[in-house]
Image (tube, rainbow, N blue to C red):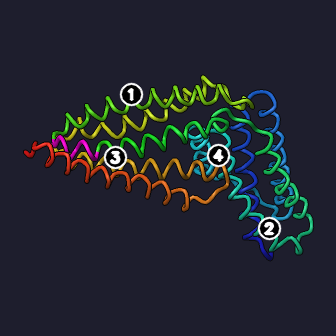
Amino acid sequence: MEYEEFLLKFQREEITEFYIYSKLAEKMQGKNKEILQSIANDEKRHYGIFKNLTKREVKPDKWKIFWYIFLFKLFGLVFALKVMERGERLAQSEYEKIVNRYPVIKNVLNDEEKHELELIELIKEERVGYISSMVLGLNDAIVELTGALAGFTFALRESKLVGLAGLITGVSAALSMAVSEYLSEKSDVEHTKNPLKAAVYTGIAYILVVIFLILPFFLISNPYISLGVAVSTVVLIIAIFTYYVAVIKNESYRKQFLEMLVLSFSVMVVSFIVGVIARKVLGIEA
């Protein structure tokens, strides 16, 4: 059959997505569960359309099912669905290659275009609503603590002392940021977020960064190697979180990543210089 390879590929994608949406629906309640199960049923119907064309059975992609369930557990429902939506856009462009040959696929294409837009609009998730609070905590922690650790490293030159100073600085700053976010949201006349929850999201994001960045200083005796590990961790955190935000908000990943990276390393370089100058001015050269 002409285009059979295309048809079998789409057929496998439809049955795979049926299982993904069904498994996600099992983990939801209320309206979200209904939406996901409805889309799962549509995907199974689409599978039947392709099966009628190919006259063959195909098995779902188990790795793909595992991957999206993993993304759901790690980053939440909306993130997993947004990543799936990106894949759907690619699939839709391929559908168009054969829709003239098999007009029945036009119905599938229309469903796919309608589904994803409705899905993302209808499904609500708390962590997405508080993403600005997480960004605030994460950005401040990365920029401030990276710079502080760089300065401490060149000023103190002892790994555990740097770690202890970073811990004290980080915890104090996290509490300060959480309180500031609480007061900021409480004074917001629109009341779009719960002030206490916003403060908690900000504080937790900050504390997590503090833990990851100071840990090397307690595990590695050489403070410069510890700083190198901390800097590498910063790059990894920035890469993961900016990707998360870019996917959720449909924004440019590269732009956000580079912007945050430049800010963090600029502060770090300035702190290097301050640390070196402080040792010379105060006369505490080792």
The outermost residue toward the left is 286
Position in image of residue 139 (x %, y %): 48, 44
Q: Which residues are magenta?
A: 150-157
Q: CA distance from mark 1 to mark 3?
A: 15 Å
**Badge 3 amino acid:** Gly
Q: CA distance from mark 2 to mark 4?
A: 22 Å
**Badge 2 amino acid:** Tyr
Dot 2 or dot 4: first in sequence order is 4
Dot 4 or dot 1: first in sequence order is 4
Q: For the residue labelled by badge 4, is the local secondary structure a helix, a strand or a loop?
A: helix
**Badge 4 amino acid:** Ala
Residue at point 28% right, 47% down? Answer: 150
Rate crowding at label 3 as few (under 14), some (14 to 19) or many (20 or more) other CA atoms within 10 Å: many
The mark found on residue 147 in the picture is 3
Q: What residue is disc 2 on?
A: 95
Dot 2 or dot 3: first in sequence order is 2
Q: For the residue labelled by badge 3, is the local secondary structure a helix, a strand or a loop?
A: helix
